[in-house]
Image (tube, rainbow, N blue to C red):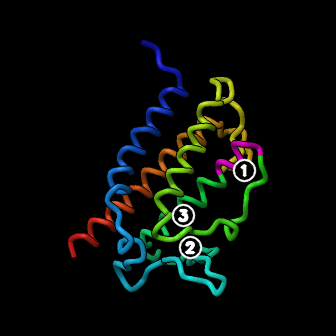
Amino acid sequence: MKTSRGDLLRWQFELTWSLFEYHLERLVPDDFLWEPVSHCWTVRPAADGTWVPDWADTEPDPVPVPTIAWLTWHIGWWWSTTIDHAEGRPPRERTAITWPGESAAVEWLHGLRKDWLAVLDRLTDSDLDATAPFPWQGDPGHTVAHMLGWVNAELMKNAAEIGSVRLQHAAR
């Protein structure tokens, strides 16, 4: 049985999502803003009721430990931006993508998954060879197939971080 690159990348995404879903199903509201250490990045309520993520344009050393709230915002940010690029839309600014709060974060991520699956369903094998619009900003050495692989790797990394923080919070 011959598998196309698109089929393999889709399989890898679904595998990554299934591992992520294990933790998403078990998250409770108290998990999101729990700070595992004092040096941490989270999201904070703004005066207008939106949530603002901690951020630095230059990565600090040491890197702060993120909360689950920050990690779910981070997934929402990079995935929304990637979907914008894949759909040929101007990408939103980081500050335009806000965290929806504890009660809606998991639903938001499920919605992004649905949007991403629509992108994957539309791609043909020849599309995979096109220059990636993101995150390498049009570097001809990186294709749309690379972008799909990057999404899978980034999602797996963030899912592992969320799982680790969730398990620490549950065990405390």
Q: Which residue is mark 1?
A: 137
CA neighbours of label 3 inside 10 A, class few (<14), some (14 to 19), many (20+): some
Find residue 74 and name its label.
3
CA gap between label 1 and label 2 equals: 20 Å
Q: At x 58% / y 76%, what residue is drawn?
A: 51
- The residue lying toward the viewer, choosing from 86 and 32, is 32
Quadrant position of the N terminus in the picture: top left
Q: At x 39% / y 39%, what residue is drawn?
A: 15
Residue 144 placement, left or right of 165 = right
Total labels: the figure holds 3
CA neighbours of label 1 inside 10 A, class few (<14), some (14 to 19), many (20+): few
Residue 30 placement, left or right of 13 = left
Find residue 146 and name its label.
none
Residue range corresponding to the magenta coloring = 82-88
Q: Quadrant of residue 164?
A: bottom left
Q: Earlier in the sequence, mark 3 or mark 1?
A: 3
Say what secondary structure mark 2 lies in: loop
- Which amino acid does the dot numbered 2 rest on? Glu
Q: Please state which of the two labelled residues, at mark 3 or mark 1, is closer to the viewer.
A: 3
Q: Which residue is mark 2?
A: 59
- Which amino acid does the dot numbered 1 rest on? Gln
Q: Is residue 149 above or below residue 163?
A: above
- The residue lying toward the viewer, choosing from 55 and 169, is 169
Q: Earlier in the sequence, mark 3 or mark 2?
A: 2
Q: At x 47% / y 51%, what residue is drawn?
A: 155
CA neighbours of label 2 inside 10 A, class few (<14), some (14 to 19), many (20+): few
Q: Is residue 15 above or below residue 66?
A: above
CA gap between label 3 and label 2 equals: 14 Å
- The residue lying toward the viewer, choosing from 104 and 1, is 104
Q: Please state which of the two labelled residues, at mark 3 or mark 2, is closer to the viewer.
A: 3
